[in-house]
Image: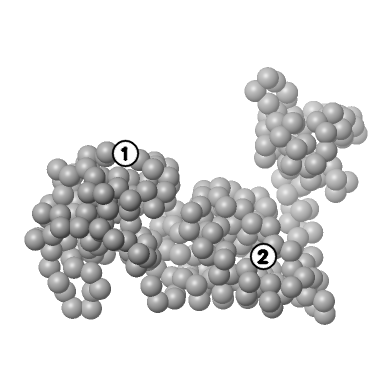
Amino acid sequence: MNLKDVESIVKIAQEGNIARAADKLFITPSALTQQLQHLEEEIGTPLFTRSRKGCALTEAGTIYLESARQILNIRRETYHRLQDISATKKGSLSIGLPPERGVAMFRYLYPRLHEQYPEITIRVHEVNVRQQQTMISAGELDLGFMTLCEHQKTADEYQILNKEEILLALPEHHPAVRHAATEKNRPFPVLDISVLQHEPFALIFNGSTLRDLQDHIFKDAGFAPTILFETARLSTILAVAADHICCGLIPASFAWQSAPGISFFTLPERPSWLQAVSYQKRSHQTKAARFLISLASDYWKQPL
């Protein structure tokens, strides 16, 4: 197999569209189409069916894609092992970071990694958990830094870096505050969310890891919340809570940021999610990758 053909087929399969795949490969759609036609003539069977909706793998294409991904994984693993014995510390790392929170994390990680490994090239993808998991399985990410629940783990490897509690965020001086109780060894008062069953909430959009956890919290409390609106940003939930518009559920790290006008509470069950790094099972982690993982662990375990 020609390596250029291998990379092209993988990209077409990922994108499901010649034009988008060509754009990612930095070639013209006509050049990619011609390359695909030559490969299919060489093999003697179509790898994709074409339609107005895009490209779909044929049975032969599925077989080719499986082998193509194995070849790319072998190449990546080989380069990583060679990178570790190279005196120049050169190489590359493709990493995934969570949306919104990933920026702050990257600002902590990158300067420290660059100081130790100045010739390592970093490619960053800010995508959600499910996208990261797909990219890891496909060999497109070396490391995926993510927050997730235990039941969301895939067959790939997961290294738990920290555990983060989910807190209740209320407008300051909310009437429900009188139901809160102070408990020893808890930084925030404890409040049962069931006392807010008639209050409006701002929640993260459906389909996200945090929304899954938020939904479980309400289910365990025995009521369906009144959802005033849904958002993609945790900062928006904090803003509307501060403006006395509604309540929210927020990761603990956000509670320690400057948040005037908001009171935070621990839930009795102390729901939490995992901060983890994921990578392909049995894949070789370079010294640079292991160093990056240690930095991420330090980042998540910083005093809030």
Q: In this rendering, does residue 191 appear at all? A: yes
Of residues 94 and 99, which is closer to you in this image?
99
Task: State the image quarter where residue 120 is shown.
Answer: bottom right
The residue located at (30%, 47%) in the rendering is 240
Check the image and report above or below for 9 versus 276: above
**In the image, what residue occupies the spot 69% across and 78% down?**
116
Q: Residue at x 46, y 71 (%)?
A: 300
The percent position of residue 288, horizontal first and vertical second, equals: 68, 73
Q: Nearer the viewer, mark 1 or mark 2?
A: 1
Residue 219 is left or right of residue 27, and the answer is left
Q: How far from the left and from the top, in percent, is residue 258?
A: 35, 64
Q: Residues within 10 Å of mark 2 (few under 14, many from 20)?
A: some
> Amino acid under label 1?
Phe
Mark 1–mark 2 Cα distance, whole angstroms, equals 42 Å
Q: Considering only vertical position in the picture, is 76 above or below 198?
A: below
Task: Work out whether 163 lies above or below 229.
Answer: below
Disc number for residue 283? 2
Circle 1 SS class: strand
The mark nearer the N terminus, 1 or 2, is 1
The quadrant of the rendering that contains the C terminus is bottom left
Colouring of the image: one colour
Label 1 belongs to which residue?
Answer: 229
